[in-house]
């Protein structure tokens, strides 16, 4: 499974995205994660971090929560990726 999930704000993220009630209420995040785990049959909840400033997160926090691990970035636009 996935141990950590980080949701980062960035320049092209809609301004109201981080105002979502789901991201403001930790119990709402936990409930959504539990529903997802039920659908996929997994049992371990990941830790979720909400980073409102991407650069600050990358420079100051990433190594603290994810040292020496594989890090994957999900980009919303796939056009720039070469096909597998």
Image (spheres, rainbow, N blue to C red):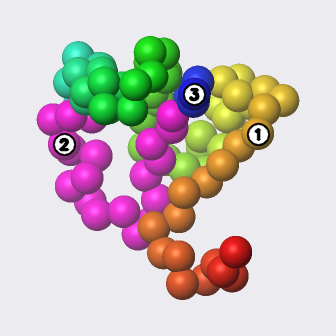
Q: CA distance from mark 2 to mark 3?
A: 26 Å
| Image position of 5 with respect to 30: above or below | below
Question: Residue 22's x, y, as percent?
Answer: 21, 34
Separation of disc 2 and disc 1 at Cα? Answer: 29 Å
For label 1, count other residues whose C-alpha is less than 10 Å away and answer few (under 14), some (14-19) or many (20+).
Answer: few
Pick the residue in front: 27 or 24: 27
Nearer mark to the viewer, of 1 and 3 = 3
In primary-sequence order, the first of circles 1 and 3 is 3
Q: Residue at x 60, y 43 (%)?
A: 56
- Furthest residue toward front: 41
Q: Secondary structure at mark 3?
A: loop
Pick whichever of labels 2 and 3 is earlier in the sequence: 3
Q: Badge 3, how many Cα within 10 Å: few under 14, some, many 20+? A: few
Q: Is residue 79 left or right of residue 64?
A: left
Q: Which mark is residue 54?
A: none
Residue 33 appears in the rendering: no
Q: Which residue is mark 1?
A: 70
Q: Quadrant of residue 74?
A: bottom right
- Element type where label 1 sits in the image: loop
The answer to the question of whether label 2 and label 1 lie on touching residues, with beta carbons closer than 8 A, is no
Label 2 vs 1, first from the N-terminus: 2
CB-based contact (under 8 Å), mark 1 and mark 3: no
x and y, in percent, of residue 67 in the image: 78, 27
- Span shown in magenta: 5-23
In the image, is residue 71 above or below residue 4?
Answer: below
Please tell me whether mark 2 or mark 3 is closer to you in this view.
3
Q: Which residue is found at the position 71% from the left and 43% from the top?
A: 71
The outermost residue toward the left is 21
């Amino acid at each position: 499974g996935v141990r950590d999930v980080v949701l980062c704000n960035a320049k092209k993220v809609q301004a109201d995205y981080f105002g979502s009630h789901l991201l403001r209420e930790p119990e709402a995040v936990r409930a959504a994660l539990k529903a997802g785990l039920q659908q996929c049959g997994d049992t371990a909840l990941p830790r979720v971090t909400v980073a409102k400033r991407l650069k600050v997160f990358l420079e100051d926090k990433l190594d603290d929560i994810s040292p020496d691990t594989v890090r994957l970035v999900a980009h919303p636009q796939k056009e720039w990726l070469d096909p597998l």
